[in-house]
Amino acid sequence: CSLCNNQHTIVRGQKDGIDVPFGDFESMFQSRVCGIGRIICMMAPWDSPYYLTRVWCLFEIYTAMQNECDITIQMPPIERQKMWDTLITGENRRNGNRFGALYDAMANTKVSKGEASVEMDKRNILDILGRSNDGGGFAAVDVQINQYLRSWVVCTLYEFFEDARLQYENKQMKPVDYAATCNNVGLGLANMGRYEEA
């Protein structure tokens, strides 16, 4: 949405006395998300994604989910590498480290705690989301977003496992690193409540 809805233009317009009502901006936002039919969520830094702290971003992913748009969650290559390195080193206990921070972010994202550059935007978005989901409000929105994000983490763990398996089979990974990766993927799945798969 940053490429389709230039919030800076609106801020500049406000400085020049041109006021765009939030309802107009919301309609433009929703029509562009639905018109394009896909969004890309940038997860960086990998262990505490900035995207999950912004109320507009959370509104974007919720809008995409409600309208059955394609959602791609992407990490910059350096962040993906850092996540991979953490899987190998074993820093994935639930508390006190970076991998635990990712699990916490995927389980505890709350739209009501999201930030916005313009406070009125935050209030307007929270008003919309508070009335959504047949009265379920923020709690229902939070559950939907967190479930989606957790499913992404599970898919990512499987991708890392498959990459490690191929590297090990091609003798590009030491047995000890492969064992650590398998163990840590299993622990990661267990932390996501996927005990049978772990």
Image (spheres, rainbow, N blue to C red):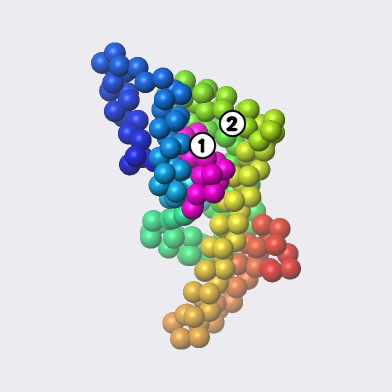
Q: Nearer the viewer, residue 1 or 150?
A: 1
Q: Nearer the viewer, residue 73 or 34?
A: 34
Report the side of 32 relative to 188 (left or right): left
> Is 16 rendered above or below residue 127?
above
**Could you tell me which residue is drawn at 57 percent across and 51 percent down?**
149
Q: Which residues are magenta?
A: 55-71
x then y, percent, for residue 61: 51, 43
**Would you say residue 121 is visible in this rendering?**
yes
Q: Magenta stretch mostly in which secondary structure?
A: helix
**Mark 2, residues whose alpha carbon is within 10 Å: few (<14), some, or many (≥20)?**
many
Q: Quadrant of residue 113?
A: top right
Report the side of 8 relative to 138 (left or right): left
Label 2 secondary element? helix
Label 1 secondary element? helix
* Among numbered discs 1 and 2, the one appearing first in the sequence: 1
Tag 1 near tag 2, CB within 8 Å: yes
x then y, percent, for residue 99: 56, 55
Q: Is residue 61 magenta?
A: yes
**Could you tell me which residue is drawn at 50 percent across and 26 percent down?**
122
**Could you tell me which residue is drawn at 46 percent across and 36 percent down?**
30
Residue closest to the far left: 16
> Is 198 rendered above or below residue 145?
below
Q: Which residue is mark 1?
A: 59
Q: Is residue 103 magenta?
A: no
Residue closest to the far top: 17
Q: Nearer the viewer, residue 195 or 86?
A: 195
Q: Nearer the viewer, residue 73 or 164?
A: 73
**Could you tell me which residue is drawn at 32 percent across and 25 percent down?**
10
- Label number found at residue 129: 2
**Would you say residue 52 is visible in this rendering?**
no
Residue closest to the far right: 196
